[in-house]
Image (cartoon, rainbow, N blue to C red):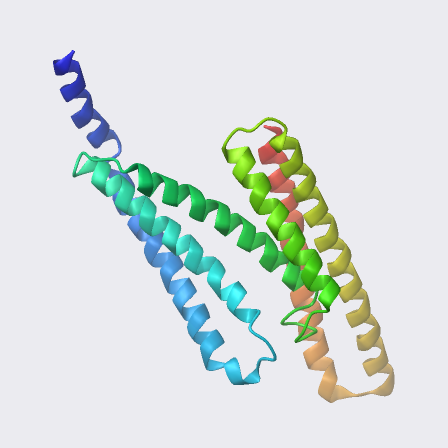
Amino acid sequence: MQEASSSSLPALSSAYQPLPSLYLGFLAIWAASGISWAFSSWRNRHFQANNLQWILALVPLIKALQMALSFLFWYSCVHLHTCSLWMSFGVYVTGILFQTASFVSFMLISHGYCIMYERLSIRERRTTAGLGCLLYLSLIGYKAAVPYFTGFLLMNYFASFYIIFCRTSQCLLVLREQLNFVEEEDIHSLHGTLNTKYTMFKRFQGTMQVAAVAFIMFRCT
């Protein structure tokens, strides 16, 4: 029994040997993205009406933290032959935080934050915060294999996607009306800015459509 146990550890180490380097590469990518985004937010802090921009900057930093914990976990397993339960728990928690923060960011953008409005209404903030908390709790229950939480998670995702698509369509309609007005009044100074915002929202809408299709395919397979 002892020989089988001792011989399986080197086999595990050789099979998972590339994982530490792989996670280290992902860590470098996400850390560079997060630091550059955070630096940009700090540099433009005097031109922002609130601190919600920092929430968007936290998303890649949370992912970088998850990649760092994953790197440390697999490095200790492969090279030190010690797998830390706390490291794996940290990867689990930061993964849930990343998914929650990503959807909260998508909802902020769909409300027009950073593109059309500098501030969100109290109702929009409460809706975003409420859905974010529900998504976080649903993800915890789903990862822990708690009964019925798969249904709760799907309902939460569908509600979030519905709000994102509705708000994005409303913002696109407003921008389209503003573009038509600017073209009729022949105001060239505003046309470029509005057209850029409209293009950004159209791309965001297309990206979210791809994300929704990928999510449905992933959950149904």
Image quadrant where residue 150 sits: top right
Q: Quadrant of the C terminus?
A: top right
Q: Residue 191 at what x, y percent from top left?
A: 74, 81
Number of callouts: 0
Q: Nearer the viewer, residue 141 or 30?
A: 141
Q: Is residue 5 shown above or below 121? A: above
Q: Is residue 129 shown above or below 199? A: above
Q: Residue at x 55, y 34 (%)?
A: 142
Q: Residue at x 61, y 34 (%)?
A: 217
Name the residue at the left extreme.
3
Q: Residue 178 at what x, y percent from top left?
A: 81, 76
Q: Residue at x 77, y 59 (%)?
A: 169
Q: Residue 153 at what x, y percent from top left?
A: 63, 38
Q: Nearer the viewer, residue 165 or 194?
A: 165
Q: Residue at x 71, y 74 (%)?
A: 195
Q: Nearer the viewer, residue 199 or 30?
A: 30
Image quadrant where residue 112 sits: bottom right
Q: As drawn, is 144 to the left or to the right of 74?
A: right
Q: Is residue 114 shown above or below 99? A: below
Q: As drawn, is 28 to the left or to the right of 92?
A: left
Q: Quadrant of the N terminus?
A: top left
Q: Residue 214 at what x, y percent from top left?
A: 60, 41
Name the residue at the top extreme.
1
Residue 202 in view here:
no
Image quadrant where residue 18 sits: top left
Q: Nearer the viewer, residue 161 or 135?
A: 135
Residue 149 in view here:
yes
